[in-house]
Image (cartoon, rainbow, N blue to C red):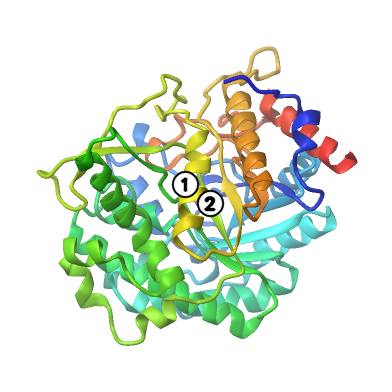
Amino acid sequence: MTHDTSPQTLARRFPESFVFGVATASYQIEGAVQTDGRKPSIWDAFSHMPGRVRGGDSGDVACDHYNRLEADLDLMSDLGAQAYRFSIAWPRILPDGVGALNEKGLDFYERLVDGLKARGIKAFATLYHWDLPLALMGRGGWTDRETASAFAQYAGIVTRRLGDRLDTIVTFNEPWCSVYLGHLMGVHAPGERSMEAAMAALHVTNLAHGLGVQAIRAERPEIPTGIVLNAMSVMAGSDSDADRKAEGRANDFHNGAFFGPLFQGAYPQSVLEGCPDLLRHIKAGDLETIRQPLDFWGLNYYTPMRVRDDPSSPFPHVAAAPAVRLEKTDIGWEIEPSGLSHIVKDLYGRYTLPEFYITENGAADNTGVENGAVSDTMRLDYISTHMSVAADLIADNYPLKGYFAWSLMDNFEWAEGYSMRFGIVHVDYETQVRTIKQSGYWYRDLIAAHRGG
């Protein structure tokens, strides 16, 4: 793919108000899992179970961000980040999921948002990035309807305390992962492998989002409120009628199961028919609750989902189709920048959606430090090509307002442990030394050019 990776050239293609940020998540960077009253999350339990996470890794220490907050805020400042997308650890705020408030946990996020404000960096908060308080698993976690009410209570508390300093707030990050990877495929916490559990978690999560938005708005109606979805860029493996239909079913199952209730107040018909377990969880008034008007939404995009028809597999009766492009990131994901425009155009064609941000985009590039530097050229190329597509979308009048690089720094990559590095800053896990990578300097130059331009 030929394109100009010069940060100055690319910067000119974005409007003046465009926001360039960096993103992280609590369990992936904070560590300090038993500090200041925090109790375990489902990821603490899951990562300590043998065989669940590569290398037996856990988030016990991670990037020790909890203890290195000020230095990490300075690092964002050095990069010129205009916004920081972070997540709040529910088990720091309400260690048992409900009940007693933990002031010391809230203090950490008070210091975080105050530190961002002091540096002129916008605060983009996520309430849930997969670290459900373990105490709530006793009743069934996300498969139990009570968890939706617990989430709403937590959302209200955080909004009341931090809302005056937040620029945006998001209920969930990638519910597709917590629902399907956690309850259907078993590769994320809590490690369930059951369509029945997945359908319960799907509806309870959607309901929690709706109740959460209501709780946020009851406290501070002025904060722009939304959700972050890793919508799948579903592409048929061939032009055959069977594969085209498979693409439609996959779209319903992977995207429509979230976008339908959120933006249309209805689940896709094919999902209701193909997953009959879902229907018994839907109570009168639920779909109205779920369909809250949102100020924005976030899209996380990394790689396309290529599918072919496979009647022998459970709904949506699809199998993975082979990659089209040879280029892959170190985690094995196909690099296909056009997948980004494909999914945006598809979603805006199907639904009435508000403005959006690309809330995560990046590459696993495991290049190490040599002579004090990291020349992660594959990541730099990945980010610049995808940003070029983002600029094209703006030129086509899609309401894209910002871009967040995933991630600020290398961190705990869930089931992959520390084996995959997504940061634009390198972390030496032995010493906790941070080293800005070539991609980080490039991103810094892009933001500087955009600010100056």
The answer to whether residue 194 of the structure is visible from this angle is: yes
The picture quadrant where one finds residue 257 is: bottom left
Residue 34 location, x and y as percent?
50, 56
SS assignment at label 1? helix
Instruction: Find out whether the residues at labels 1 and 2 contact each other: C-beta distance under 8 Å.
Output: yes
- Numbered label attached to residue 382: none
Q: Of discs 1 and 2, which sits in the foreground?
A: 1
Asked if residue 247 is positioned above or below residue 388 in the image, the reply reads: below
Q: Is residue 221 left or right of residue 129?
A: right
The answer to whether residue 101 of the structure is visible from this angle is: no
Q: Which residue is mark 1?
A: 343
* Front residue (pair 341, 218): 341
Of the two numbered discs 1 and 2 on the same chain, state the one appearing first in sequence. Answer: 2
Asked if residue 429 is positioned above or below residue 87 in the image, the reply reads: above
Q: Amino acid at mark 1?
A: Ile
Give the Cα separation between the discs numbered 1 and 2: 9 Å
